[in-house]
């Protein structure tokens, strides 16, 4: 049985700020893949009674970093995405254990891209993260700075990350063709209640289309590429979003 060592630290004000942020509604919906009447979902495609692919139903693509390893972080940019766009770590001045983004950077991360059809100009993208945990024990601390502590003694509020936690993070993004119609790009902004609500998020496919079984991609956040990988067409209707994931 795992033994969890929890180090409680910080102020009630900080906890309340985080709790209130978490209670705000998510702007995403759990999309599913629906095939047209007379067709069935099989091996990632909608097929008719003769086994012919119709490509007229909903489609989904999946990428992750722990099983097939079709996703790789690029540089340190993913840390800022985890901190600001998802709000899962580094929420105060000093953070350790599962509160530190390092635990999340070395953990599991996946991206699901879903579209109502292959000719759409809008998609829904879901980001999920899970920290790397220890088999025997885990700890967590998130503390304000010395200056914040001094201010608290004078009655000033201790404020950490004021944004909401979004894990999973679901965003609606606009699609446009690129590279002389050989590829496409999806663009959107962070969740309204996070500190990334004005930050541009781009999924860029240099060569590929939604009809394909797979294609390479890269994800940019605030103009910096943070992830590269390969999207593979989902072989289940929900793209695995209802199942546990990670190590």
Image: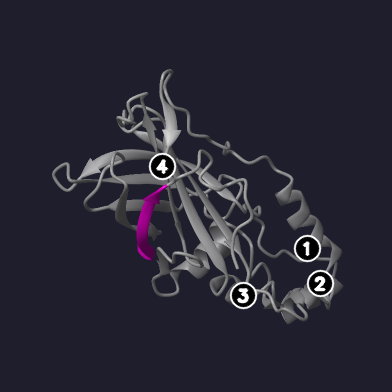
* Label pair 4/3, CB-CB below 8 angstroms: no
Question: In the depicted view, which residue is nearer to us: 188 or 227?
Answer: 227
Where does residue 227 sit, x and y in percent of width and height?
A: 40, 64
The mark closer to the camera, 1 or 4, is: 4
Question: In the depicted view, which residue is nearer to us: 145 or 98?
Answer: 98
Q: What residue occupies the far top of the structure in this picture?
A: 37
Kindly report the distance in space between the C-alpha atoms of the residues bearing marks 2 and 3: 20 Å
Badge 2 density bin: few <14, some 14–19, many ≥20, Cα 10 Å: some
Residue 103 has which mark? Answer: 3
Residue at image coords 80%, 78%: 150
The residue tagged 4 is 43
Q: Quadrant of residue 177?
A: top left
Badge 3 density bin: few <14, some 14–19, many ≥20, Cα 10 Å: some
The mark closer to the camera, 3 or 1, is: 3
Where does residue 211 sit, x and y in percent of width and height?
A: 29, 39
The residue tagged 2 is 10
Where does residue 146 sit, x and y in percent of width and height?
A: 74, 81
Q: Earlier in the sequence, mark 2 or mark 3?
A: 2
Kindly report the distance in space between the C-alpha atoms of the residues bearing marks 4 and 3: 35 Å
Badge 4 density bin: few <14, some 14–19, many ≥20, Cα 10 Å: few
* Label pair 1/2, CB-CB below 8 angstroms: yes
The residue tagged 1 is 14
> Looking at the image, is 2 positioned above or below residue 18?
below
């Amino acid at each position: 049985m795992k033994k969890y060592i929890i180090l409680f630290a910080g102020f009630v004000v900080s906890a309340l700020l985080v709790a209130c942020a978490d209670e705000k509604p998510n702007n995403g919906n759990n999309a599913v893949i629906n095939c047209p009447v007379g067709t069935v979902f099989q091996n990632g495609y909608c097929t008719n009674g003769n086994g012919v692919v119709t490509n007229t139903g909903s489609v989904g693509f999946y990428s992750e970093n722990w099983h097939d390893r079709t996703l790789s972080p690029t540089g340190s940019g993913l840390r800022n995405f985890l901190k600001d766009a998802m709000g899962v770590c580094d929420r105060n001045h000093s953070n350790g254990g599962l509160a530190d983004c390092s635990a999340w950077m070395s953990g599991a991360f996946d991206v699901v891209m879903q579209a109502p059809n292959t000719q759409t100009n809008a998609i829904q993208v879901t980001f999920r993260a899970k920290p790397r945990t220890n088999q025997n024990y885990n700890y967590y601390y998130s503390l304000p700075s010395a200056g914040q502590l001094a201010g608290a003694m004078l009655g000033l509020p201790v404020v950490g990350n004021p944004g909401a936690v979004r894990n999973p993070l679901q965003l609606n993004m606009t699609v446009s063709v690129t590279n002389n119609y050989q590829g496409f790009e999806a663009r959107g902004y962070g969740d309204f209640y996070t500190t990334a609500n004005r930050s541009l998020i781009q999924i860029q496919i240099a060569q590929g289309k939604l009809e394909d079984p797979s294609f390479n991609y890269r994800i940019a956040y605030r103009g910096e590429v943070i992830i590269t990988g390969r999207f593979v067409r989902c072989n289940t209707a929900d793209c695995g979003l209802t199942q546990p994931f990670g190590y």
